[in-house]
Amino acid sequence: MTLLAHILIAATYALIGAFVAFVLPGVFSSVEGTTALIFGSVVFLVGLQFHTMYIWKIGKEDTVSRLLALHQDYQVSIDRLEESKTELDEVREKLYMLDSQQNTEIISEMHVLQTLLNQVIEKSGKSLEERVDIEGALGKEEQSAKGNLQKKLEKIERSDGEVLNIMHHALEGNRVDLYLQPIVALPSRRVIHYESYSRVRDEEDNVIFPSQYLKLAEDSGLVGTLDNLLLFRCIQVIRRLGPRRPDLRFFCNISSVSLNDKEFFPQFIDFMMENHELSDRLIFEFSQKDVLRHSALVGRSLATLGRRGFRFSMDHIVDLNMDLADLASRYFRYVKVDAKVILDQGVDIHPDDLKEAFSRYDLNLIVEKIESDQTIVEILDYGMDYGQGYLFGEPRLSSDTRLDL
C-alpha cells in the first residue's frame, strides 16, 4: 500500500471524527460541545489505532514472507554449494588421477630414454675411441711405405671419426630431430599418415643425413638405439597432438638390431603394453627380411602387442610372392612396395590385381618412392589407394608449421 493511500485513510478517520463531534450535540442535547470534541477525537484515535495495527500486521506478514524467501534462497545456495563441492572433489580426483597417469607415463619414458642414452653414449664413445686407435695405427705402420695413398686413407678414416664424433655429441646435446614425411590418399593427395625419420645435427646445426652416418652406426651398434630414440621422439609428437585428427597414424621403423636387443626389446614391449592407448597412433614398421627371419621369441612379443591393438607395416619388399594370409594373421595391416617393383611387373600377380589381392586379407598397399608425375599417372592406372614419395612432400622437421598436424 502506498503512502498516499495511508494518508487518505487517515484523512477519512479525521473526517469521521469531525462529523461525530459536529453531529453529536444535535442528536443528544445533553452533550456539550467539549464532550462532542472528545468523542470525535476518540473516534479518530480508534480508527488510527486500527489502521496502525493493520499496517503492523501487513509489515509482519511481509517480513515473514521475506524471511521465508531468504531461507529458501539460503537452502538453495547451500545445496548448490554442496553440489559444487562434490563436483570440485570429482574434478580434483580426476586431475590427480590424470596427473598420476601422466607422471607415470613420463617416468616410464624417462627410464627408457635414460637406458637409450646410456647405450648411445657408451657405444658411440667406445666406437669413436676404437676408430681413433685404428687411425693412429694406420698412420704409424704405413707412413713411410704408401705416401699419397696413406694420406687418402687417413682422410677417409678421419672423416668417419668426425662423423662418429658428431653423432656422439649430438646425442649428448639432444640434437637428434624427428622428421616426418606424408603418406597420402590417392588420387586426392590428402595426407592421412606420416612416416618418421631421424636427422642428426652438428654443433653448427648442419643436418647430417642417414646416408652419411648409417653405415657407421650399423658398424658401431648405434643404429638400434637411434631407431628407438626416434620412436620416443614420435611418441612426444603424439602426446602433443592429443585427440586432434584421431585417424592420423605415425609409421616408426624398428630395425633388426632393436628386435634382437635382449636388454632393450623386452623393456620396449613392457612400455608399449603399459601405454596401449598409443596403438591407435603408432604403426611399427619392419623390413621384409626381418619379418621372415626374426626369432620365435620376437614373434610372440609382437603378437602380444598385436593383441593389445598395435598394428604393423612391412617395407623393403624384395619378393611380392608371399603368404598374405599369414601376414594378416600376424597383425600386419600395411605393406609398402617400391613404385619400380610394381611398374616393372616383375611379380606373378599382375599390377591390376595387386590391390585386390592385398585387400582380400585386409592389407593396405602403399606405393612408395613416387618421385615424378609420370610415375603417379601409371600408378593411378592400377587403382592404388595410397602413395608416398618426394612428389607429395619431403621429410620435414616435426615442428615445421607446414606439416598438417
Image (cartoon, helix red, strand yellow):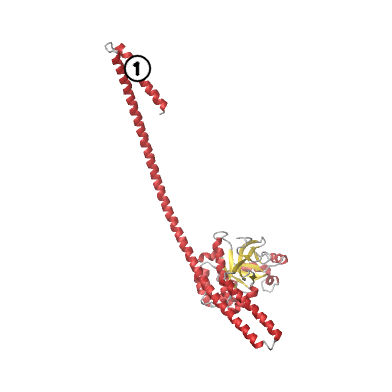
Which residue, given by chain and number where applicable, does mark 1 sit on?
18
Confirm whether residue 365 shows in the render.
yes
Please provide percent x and percent y for residue 294. Answer: 56, 77
Could you say which is closer to the camera, residue 378 or residue 182? 182
Which is nearer the eye, 123 or 336? 123
Q: Secondary structure at mark 1?
A: helix
Q: Going 34% across and 27% down the picture, which residue do you hit?
A: 52
Q: Residues within 10 Å of mark 1 (few under 14, many from 20)?
A: some
Q: Residue at x 73, y 66 (%)?
A: 374
**Residue 385: x %, y % from top left:** 65, 64
Q: What type is the residue that disc 1 sits on?
A: Ala
- Residue 56 percent across, percent down from the top left: 34, 31
List the single residue furthest toward the right.
Answer: 374
The image quarter containing residue 59 is top left
Q: How many marks?
A: 1
- Measured along the vertical axis of the image, is residue 305 above or below residue 25? below
Image position of 160 (left or right of 4):
right
Image point (37%, 23%), residue name? 10
Residue 259 visible in image:
no
Where 231 falls versus 10 (above or below)?
A: below
Q: The N terminus appears in which quarter of the rendering?
A: top left
